[in-house]
Image (cartoon, grey):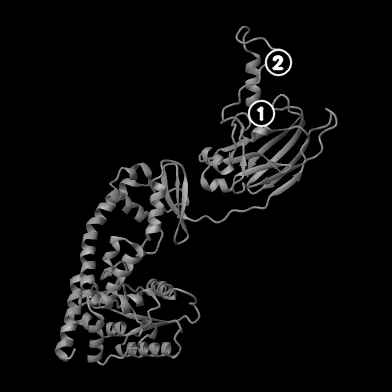
Amino acid sequence: MSDGRGQVRAFERRVCDFVAAREVLRPGERPLVLLSGGPDSMCLLHLLPIVDRRLSLGLRAAALHVDYGLRGSASDRDRHLVEQACAAAGLTLHVERLEGSLRGPDFQARARVQRYALARQLARRFGYGPLVTAHNRDDQAETVLYRLVKYASPLGLAGMRAREDDVARPLLGAGADEIRAYCAACDIAYGQDASNLEPVYARNALRLEVLPALARLNPRVGETLADAAAMAAAEGEVVAAALDGAWERVRTTPRHGEIAALELAALAAEPPALRALCLRRLAAVGLPAGALVTRRQVAALQGLAGRPAGAGRAALRGGREAVRESGRLAVRPVPAAHACAPVEVSVAAPPSSSATPPASCAAVFCRWGAAATILPGAHPPEAYRAALRQAEARPPGVAPALARPPEPSPPSPAAVGAGGDERRLSVGFAAPPRVLTLRHPRRGERFTPFGRVAATTVARFLAGAGCGRDERRRALVLEVDGALAAVAFVDRAGALRSRVAHERRVTQSTEWTLSVALEER
């Protein structure tokens, strides 16, 4: 600002006009200014009372400085600069020292998350708002490029807003060079973070290498990108209105443990562009405000939604997952791992005579209780016995006379567990069983369910039998002498269901029957 005071006044006027036109700060607010000690934030601190006075806002501001202690004496210098400037301005200053809290890669992003979390805690505690940052026009250009490269979303072109949720950015219309010239003209002291001059971080590389290269094509590339962001933001409001309407048409009530859910049939009826935007919004549910969604997350949801049928799951950022099931696509927190140690019980020797009570044992595992009784001979479930009685009662002439009634057809899948009451199982053996083990299903294990001729995985059987994904983790496997004998589970309607392995079904030739009564505890 070589023209001296005239340039200073012109810059201050432009900042005030920007704040007024965008309603960046509003009358009577209690803004919390985030101060790093760099040129942008120290310029903002100097300008805030000027904006307040000229626009008659009546602001009651305070400030926050977060000292990570990462730069030795430079960190101390910046803290002292901020303390002195706030004392001179009569501003309440909150200083948070977080030495040693950040280690490892990507600490800039983690520091930003930590800083905003601290600011919001203070805002809730003292009634501050909005949070005021010193983002400028060059930061906006970096953000637009970063989001386009990182997220491949046209929505990212909108960049940052001057007033967005609880964040205000009064300097978003000013260039970095203008800000530094203003600091020099007004003798504003500030610190320079040397790490910002190293192109080892993504945003530093954009600022130090990419934008200067683009400036050779267009010397005003920063302004061009900022203008593109403003236009994209305006057009985004139209898109947002259309998306809101589509979202209302496709969303459905979340079930227990879900954050949000969509009806897939309704989603398929939407135009492809709105369908993709609905999935992007679903992928963002549960993330912090303003967090962007990667193209991989959207592609994962598109893959789940585009399946012709069946269930599926995809991992999402932030400890969440997307689950497709029963014609719905839902996002929920990743459930905690469910693991229980198997429980083994010895099966008592069978009775030596008909006068001796049947041998019994009992066990409790996870939420399941099982009482097992060993019976000599064939003791089929009631559904089997009913089918046998029906075969025996067949009228003469309907079928050839046999010395023994024909083997009945297997009962329906709804009754194969134990004759309509699937809390009771009958498991057949050629020799007395010795050890009964209660456990959860193992990954990839297979069995042939009673009534089928082909083996399948336990997980696939449970899914087809109406057992919800979470319930599959808690299903019960009854293992006898090291081999899977039966599976029990709770279906989506809350009913206890069970199925015996086909090779363990009880028929008329069964030598020993293990009768099991199940209880969901």
User: Which quadrant would residue 209 be assigned to in this image?
Assistant: bottom left
Q: Amino acid at mark 2?
A: Arg
> Residue 7, image x and y in percent?
16, 87
Residue 97 left/right relative to 64 = right
Determine whether label 2 and label 1 are within 8 Å by CB.
no
Q: Residue at x 61, y 40 (%)?
A: 488
Q: Choose between 49 and 466: the one closer to the eye.
A: 466
Q: Quadrant of the N terminus?
A: bottom left
Does 35 sit above or below residue 342?
Answer: below
List the residue tagged with mark 2.
404
Q: Residue furthest toward the top?
A: 397
Q: Residue 365, which numbered label?
A: none
User: Which quadrant would residue 4 be assigned to in this image?
Assistant: bottom left
Q: Quadrant of the C terminus?
A: top right
Label 2 SS: loop
Does 312 sit above or below residue 221?
Answer: above
Q: Choose between 208 and 462: the one closer to the eye.
A: 208
> Residue 283, image x and y in percent?
39, 56
List the residue tagged with mark 1.
381
> Residue 43, image x and y in percent?
27, 84
Mark 1 Cα-neighbour bin, 10 Å: few <14, some 14–19, many ≥20? many
The Cα–Cα distance between marks 2 and 1, rounded to whole angstroms, is 19 Å
Residue 94 left/right relative to 359 = left
Q: Residue at x 83, y 33 (%)?
A: 351
Q: Amino acid at mark 1?
A: Pro
Mark 2 Cα-neighbour bin, 10 Å: few <14, some 14–19, many ≥20? few
